Image (spheres, rainbow, N blue to C red):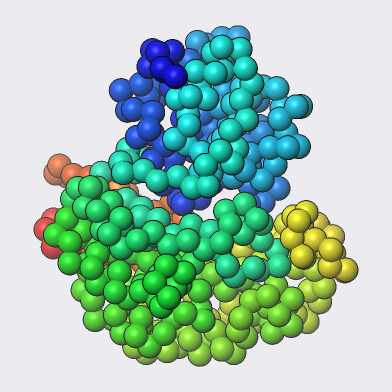
């Protein structure tokens, strides 16, 4: 089949969900060809929505996005809508007949068939190519992040089987990319100040592929690449933070002293019902060990409030954990009841109002911790990587080592001279709030920051 129609169309892309989905979108863009991609949706004849389906709110966002985009059929140049990613992968059987706003459905591994699907759509077909391929391999990417940082997805799927999570039923079993593929992809990104490693669980890298854990070895090989300035590690499961890995993070100068460890709760009974390994006491010991071995390490985590059967006492145990752990950054979410997960059938489901009140309480406690920490930075000088300009605030903004893009706080700063995105600056912190810092440039730094 020739793809003459596909080659003539302008295409807009909307990527929803997490940074792992962003990497999939970037690989999809390489299949499409960057010469056909337009930034303004009003100029697109085809719009692709790459969806997330992890939570009900994610699915709602995807549906609402399609409805909003569909309005461009009346006012813009839009001719076709394509829905890709996690949502059709899991729910296409329920969606195809009724969700007629969408012309083409493709799953998480089907992006290579985009040209063929588009061609068929322009011949009058509604296309369901979900599951046409088992997985998607792409040699190229069109990077959508600022030029100085990029994500590297080292594995897909998950074997942890947390009772609240749909990911294994959407993405399948844990599948590591080969070292050769990852090193080649990292080299192809060009000079990046910060390479951010992502997966559902980065710390299990290689176990499925090589029969043993290869995460430390991968870190060492990525660190040896001349084009990689620094490496940030996201989504580490606590049971895999071994002495070997902690030592590598401590001693490897290219690894940013920051870890995202999704703990999800701190009460032993709740954690067991979640099918999570560990206890609150064990987690506190791990955090203390990390801080002892790696002074000033930043530790981020996420937690779920209102899991089925969570008593007031068990919730109080989580609150006390937050007070003791004094995490650098944390996110809190109300439990989302997802059909198809074991937790969906658990008794003692908790009212939404109670769940939201508990989330609010957790954020209030973390806000006190974050505010006190930030206030302690006033008067100090931080090495800040400039990410861009905030025109509303009339200020530049960037991040110190303890903040990851988009999920953590920013450092806003002023400077009388010229500022270059992707460069480091010594910033004197003049004031702080619970989430962000504010200051002015003391000097330009050409050294890689930690």
Q: Is residue 334 above or below residue 47?
A: below
Residue drawn at (56%, 12%) of the image: 123
Side (left or right) of 345 relative to 206: right
Q: Residue 83, image x and y in percent?
A: 58, 32
How many numbered badges does the structure rendering display?
A: 0
Q: Is residue 195 above or below residue 283?
A: above
Q: Quadrant of the N terminus?
A: top left
Q: Nearer the viewer, residue 423 or 230?
A: 230
Residue drawn at (13%, 56%) of the image: 444
Q: Residue 348, image x and y in percent?
A: 87, 69
Q: Residue 229, image x and y in percent?
A: 20, 60
Side (left or right) of 91 relative to 422: right
Q: Quadrant of residue 58?
A: top right
Residue drawn at (74%, 83%) of the image: 269
Q: Is residue 356 above or below residue 11?
A: below
Side (left or right) of 427 relative to 160: left
Is residue 12 visible to the viewer in this orientation of the structure? no
Residue drawn at (66%, 32%) of the image: 64
Q: Quadrant of the C terminus?
A: bottom left
Q: Is residue 192 above or below residue 30?
A: below
Q: Quadrant of residue 379?
A: bottom left
Q: Nearer the viewer, residue 10 or 418?
A: 10
Q: Nearer the viewer, residue 241 or 302?
A: 241
Is residue 135 visible to the viewer in this orientation of the structure? yes
Residue at the far front in the pictured view: 1
Q: Residue 26, image x and y in percent?
A: 38, 40
Q: Nearer the viewer, residue 60 or 437?
A: 60
Residue at the far right in the pictured view: 347
């Amino acid at each position: 089949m020739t793809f003459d129609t596909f080659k003539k169309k302008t295409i807009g892309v909307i990527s929803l969900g997490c940074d792992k989905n962003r990497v999939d979108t970037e690989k999809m863009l390489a299949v499409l060809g960057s010469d056909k991609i337009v930034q303004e949706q009003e100029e697109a004849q085809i719009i692709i929505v790459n969806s997330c389906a992890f939570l009900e709110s994610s699915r709602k966002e995807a549906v609402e996005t399609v409805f909003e985009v569909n309005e461009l059929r009346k006012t813009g140049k839009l001719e076709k809508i394509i829905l890709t990613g996690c949502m059709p992968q899991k729910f296409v059987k329920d969606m195809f007949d009724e969700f007629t706003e969408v012309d083409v459905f493709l799953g998480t591994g089907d992006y290579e068939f985009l040209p063929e699907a588009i061609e068929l759509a322009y011949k009058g077909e509604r296309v369901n190519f979900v599951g046409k391929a088992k997985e998607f391999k792409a040699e190229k990417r069109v990077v959508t992040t600022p030029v100085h940082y990029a994500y590297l997805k080292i594995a897909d799927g998950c074997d942890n089987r947390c009772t609240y999570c749909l990911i294994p039923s959407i993405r399948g079993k844990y599948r590591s990319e080969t070292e050769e593929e990852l090193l080649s992809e990292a080299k192809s990104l060009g000079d990046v100040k910060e390479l951010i490693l992502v997966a559902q669980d980065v710390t299990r890298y290689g176990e499925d592929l090589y029969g043993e854990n290869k995460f430390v070895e991968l870190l060492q090989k990525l660190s040896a690449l001349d084009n990689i300035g620094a490496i940030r590690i996201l989504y580490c499961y606590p049971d895999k933070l071994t002495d070997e890995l902690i030592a590598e993070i401590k001693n490897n100068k290219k690894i940013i002293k920051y870890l995202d460890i999704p703990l999800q709760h701190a009460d032993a009974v709740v954690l067991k019902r979640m099918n999570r390994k560990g206890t609150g006491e064990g987690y506190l010991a791990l955090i203390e060990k990390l801080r002892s071995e790696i002074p000033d390490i930043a530790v981020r985590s996420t937690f779920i409030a209102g899991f089925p059967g969570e008593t007031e006492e068990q919730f109080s145990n989580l609150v006390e954990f937050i007070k003791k752990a004094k995490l650098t950054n944390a996110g809190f979410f109300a439990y989302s009841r997802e059909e198809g997960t074991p937790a969906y059938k658990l008794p003692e489901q908790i009212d939404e109002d109670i769940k939201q009140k508990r989330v609010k309480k957790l954020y209030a406690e973390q806000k006190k911790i974050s505010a006190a920490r930030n206030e302690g930075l006033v008067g100090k000088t931080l090495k800040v990587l400039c990410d861009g300009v905030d025109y509303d605030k009339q200020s530049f903004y960037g991040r110190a080592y303890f903040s990851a893009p988009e999920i953590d706080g920013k450092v806003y700063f002023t400077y009388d001279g010229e500022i270059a995105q992707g460069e480091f600056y010594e910033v004197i912190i003049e004031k702080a709030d619970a989430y962000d810092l504010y200051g002015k440039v003391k000097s330009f730094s050409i050294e890689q920051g930690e």
